[in-house]
Amino acid sequence: MARSWTRLALVVLLAVVAGQLLVGGGALPAGGTAPPLALRTLDGGAVDLAALRGKVVAVNFWATWCGPCRREMPELAAFWASNHDRCFELLGVVEESPRDEVVAAASRIPYPVLLDGGAEAASAWKVAGYPRTYLLDPEGKVRRVFEGTIGRAELEAAVAPLRPASCPAR
């Protein structure tokens, strides 16, 4: 009987590993170049991550139904408000959420809110859960991945050493 359970456990483990390999499992690693990100805002404007090179960028993936996402938004908004003119940008990428709920949530968010209706960006960025925030250096490399909520002080500590001496004019 114990032998049957051992075999079953081995089969389950192999199935999980194979599934992760097939869907490109694992988190987007720090140190690599961020995947492309070009999405529309609620008003139809276009935002392309490539145009933000030279700035430190935080890309925050969230959903309207995500309690921790809603709890971190005031902290992110406050940080953005005091830093967006200091060579920093924050992009909120919303997933798995009805448009009317996104519009309501976005009314309290001062930074760009981008729509990823088909979850193509979430897939490319290997987002497994919300909230997830990727911190990119001015060259577009992923320097930190925050799984779960992030506070203003934690974000400030992570951004400060990455901030360039001068910001490119746009």
Image: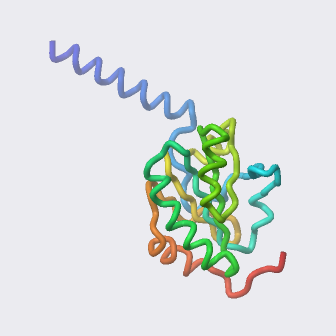
The residue at the point 68 percent across, 87 percent down is: 165
The residue at the point 57 percent across, 59 percent down is: 134
Residue 83 coordinates in the image, percent (x, y): 62, 78
Task: Tell whether 9 sits left or right of 147.
Answer: left
The residue at the far left in this view is 1
Residue in the foreground of this view, choosing between 27 and 128: 128
Residue 116 coordinates in the image, percent (x, y): 68, 43
Q: Is residue 76 above or below residue 127?
A: below
Task: Tell whether 53 sits left or right of 3.
Answer: right
Q: How is the image coloured?
A: rainbow
Q: Is residue 77 above or below residue 123?
A: below
The residue at the point 65 percent across, 41 percent down is: 100
Residue in the foreground of this view, choosing between 148 and 126: 148
Q: Quadrant of residue 101?
A: top right
Q: Is residue 75 above or below residue 40?
A: below
Q: Is residue 122 above or below residue 71?
A: above
Residue in the foreground of this view, choosing between 137 and 88: 88
The residue at the point 63 percent across, 80 percent down is: 163
